[in-house]
Image: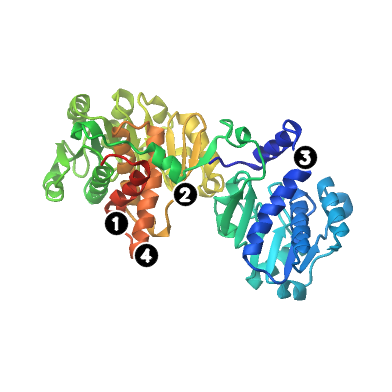
Amino acid sequence: MKVVTAEEIALIDKLTIENYGIPSMVLMERAALSVVKHIIELKPKNLIILAGPGNNGGDGIAVGRILKNEGYKIKIFQPFPEDKLSEDCKKQIYIAEKFGLKVFARYPTEIELAHADVLIDAIFGTGLKKKIEGDLAKLIEYLNSLNKTVVAVDLPSGVSSDSGEILGCAVKAKITVTFGIPKRGHFLYPARDYVGSLYIEDIGFPKELIESESLKVSLITKEIATSLLPLRPSYSHKGTYGHLLVIAGSVGKTGAALLCGKSALRAGSGLVTIAVPAALKVVFQAKVLEEMILALPCNTKTISKDAIKPLEEFIRERADVIAFGPGVGINEDTLEILKFLLTSCNVPLVIDADGITLLSTDENLLRKAKTKTVITPHPGELSRLIKMPVKEIEAQRIEIAQKVAKVFNCTVVLKGVPTVVANEDGKTFINTTGNPGMATGGSGDVLTGIIASLIGQKLDPFYASVLGVYLHGLSGDLAALNKGYHGIIAFDLIEYLPLAIKKLSDEKHCQY
C-alpha cells in the first residue's frame, strides 16, 4: 500500500476531478459516508462536529448532515470567517442548513464539549502548514483533557501530514478515517500517537493514481512480506540457501557476533561462518553448534589487517554474502578490512554497528563500494555518518533515508520507530511491525543477520531488507504476546523468528 504526502494527495484529488470527471462534491459525499459508518458503530447519543474552513471542514459538515438525517443529535461549530472558507465548504453549509441543521459560527463552549459523548474533528486536514495557536489551541488542549471519544476526519488536526510533527498542538483521536490512501503522518512519530485506530476508506480515486509508480513510499504490509518470502523447494540442500560470512566480534563484544550468526540460521541460511579474532576462538567455539568459526589474525582486541588475505580467499571460494560490523571494534585494522570489503569483494555486503562508525571516518568510503551494499544505522550512527543532528534525522526519517541511499548508492535501513528502508532510486518502505520491547541491546545484530541471510537466499538486497525488518518486528510482536514488553531480550527475537516466518509461509503455502 502506497503512502503519500500532502502534495501527492492534492494532485490525486485534482486529477480525479479534472481528468476523470468525478466532481469534488461527489468525493466529499463518499468521504462523509465512510466516516459516518464508523461513527454509527460507536452508538453516539450527543455529537459535536468541529469544522474548519477548508474541504476537511466540508467533509465534517457533510458528516453532520447525514447523521442529522438519520436522527442523531448533532451540533456543528465552524468558527472561521466566511472569506476564509473553501467553495465546497460553503456549499456544504448551505446544504446542511437546507436540511434544518444550524452551523454555529463560533467555538463550542466548555459545557457543550463536556456534554458530548463523541466529537468529530474536521478542523484541518493534510493542508495544514503553520502552528495552531491562540483560541483554537486552547480549545484543542481542553478537548484532549476531556478524554472523549474523538473521530478525526482524514488526519487529526495539528498533525503534519508529511513529517508527523505536531504543529503547535494536535487533537488526540481514538479513530482516524482517511480517504483512498494513507498519509505519511499517520505512521510517523509523534503524530502516530494522535491517530488512534486508522481506517482507510475507498472514496473513488482511480486505482492507477493511488498505485502509481511515481509514488515512491509504501507500507510493508503482510501481503508484501509474504510475496517476498523465499520458497523452500523439496529438492534442495544447505548450499541452496547461501553461505553467510559474519565478520564480527572483539574482546568484550562476542555476543553481537553470536546473535548475528544465530539469527541468520533461524532466518533460513544454509551455512554460517563467523570470522573472529583468533584469540577468541575458544570462547566462540564453546558457544556455537550449527555455526562454523573462522579464526583470523588479531591484535590485542580485534581482527587485524593481516586477516585480509585469508578473508579474500574464503570469500572467493565460499561466501555468498557478508555481514560486517556487529561488535567488530573500531581501529585502523578494522577500517582497512572494511576498505578491502568495499573495494574488492563481489558479493553483497551488509554493514552495521561498528562498521557504520568506521564508514563515518571517510565520507567517500561508502561511495567506493564495488558491490551491492546495505547499511543498517540507528539515528545516532547515521548522525555520525552524514554529520547531521539526530533530532533533524528523526524529524524527516523518510527524506533522510532516501537522500542517503541516493548519495551513497546503497540500501539504507534507518532503524527506529518506524524503521524506514530506502534504495538509491528513491523507492521506500515504512515498516509496520515491532514494539517498544525490542528496544534492547543486540536487537540490531539480530536484524543484520536476518537481512544477510535473506540476501544469501537470493533475494535482492533491497527486498531482503524490506522482508527482514518486517520479520524482525513480527518476531518481537510474537515475543511480546507471551513475555510482555519489559522482559524481551535480543535472543527472544531469534527464538520467535521461525514462528514469524511460519506465519508468512502458511499464507504463501511454501514447501517446508
Q: Identify whether 443 is placed above or below 218.
A: below
Question: Left or right of 334: which side holds 477?
Answer: right
Q: What element carries label 4?
A: loop
The disc at residue 492 is 1
Identify the residue shown where x is 63% and y is 34%: 209
Task: Give the alpha-carbon distance from disc 3 to disc 4, as whole Å.
Answer: 49 Å
Q: Earlier in the sequence, mark 3 or mark 4?
A: 3
Q: Identify whether 207 is placed above or below 327.
A: above
Q: Which residue does the numbered mark 2 point to in the structure image?
A: 432
Question: Left or right of 115: which side holds 397?
Answer: left
Q: As shown in the figure, which amino acid type bears the numbered disc 2?
A: Thr
Q: Which residue does the numbered mark 4 point to in the structure image?
A: 484
Task: Give the alpha-carbon distance from disc 1 to disc 2, as whole Å.
Answer: 19 Å
Q: What element carries label 2?
A: loop
Question: Left or right of 313: which side holds 425?
Answer: right
Closer-to-camera residue (421/238): 238
